[in-house]
Image (tube, helix red, strand yellow):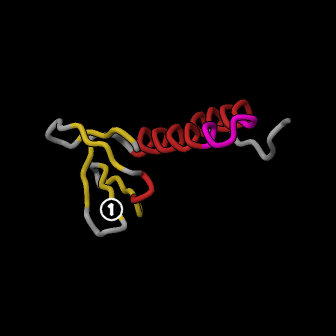
C-alpha cells in the first residue's frame, strides 16, 4: 500500500497492484484496474519511487537474504542508474 494525497489534501492509501496506469496531464491521474480514476498531488517520479519502495519492502520481508541487493537496485532505480546484474 502506498500513501498519496488527493488534490483537496485528503490522504489516501491505495494498493499499488490495482494501478493500471498513471499519467501526468498536467495533474497525476491514476487509472485503476476497476476503471476508477484518482487525481493525486504526487508527481509521476514520486509515485514511481513510492511503488518501488513498497515493493522492495515486500520482497525484503519475503526474501531476507536478498535485502542488500534489493536495496541497491531500488536506490539505482530511483536515481536513474541502471544495473544489469545483482552482485552476491
Q: Residues within 10 Å of mark 1 (few under 14, many from 20)?
A: some
Disc 1 target residue: 31
Judge whether 67 appears above or below 39 on screen: above
Residue at 31% over, 43% down = 13
The image position of residue 49, as x and y in percent, is 49, 39
The image position of residue 50, as x and y in percent, is 45, 39
| SS category of the residue bearing label 1 | strand
User: Quarter of the image containing the C terminus?
Assistant: top right
Residue at 27% over, 49% down = 27
Q: Does 61 appear in magenta?
A: yes
The image position of residue 85, as x and y in percent, is 81, 44
Tell which of 68 and 81 is nearer to you.
Answer: 68
87 horizontally vs 43: left or right: right
Report the label total. Answer: 1
Judge whether 3 appears above or below 23 on screen: above
Tell me which corner region of the image, top left, top right, bottom left or bottom right, holds residue 8.
top left
User: Quarter of the image containing the N terminus?
Assistant: top left
The image position of residue 28, as x and y in percent, is 31, 50
Residue extent of the magenta highlight: 59-66
Q: Does 77 appear in magenta?
A: no
Amino acid at each position: 500500500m502506498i500513501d498519496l494525497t488527493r488534490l483537496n489534501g485528503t490522504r489516501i492509501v491505495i494498493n499499488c497492484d490495482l494501478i493500471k496506469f498513471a499519467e501526468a496531464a498536467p495533474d497525476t491521474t491514476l487509472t485503476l484496474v476497476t476503471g476508477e480514476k484518482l487525481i493525486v498531488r504526487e508527481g509521476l517520479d514520486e509515485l514511481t519511487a513510492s511503488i518501488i519502495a513498497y515493493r522492495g519492502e515486500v520482497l525484503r520481508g519475503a526474501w531476507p537474504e536478498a535485502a542488500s541487493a534489493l536495496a541497491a537496485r531500488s536506490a539505482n532505480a530511483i536515481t536513474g542508474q541502471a544495473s544489469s546484474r545483482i552482485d552476491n
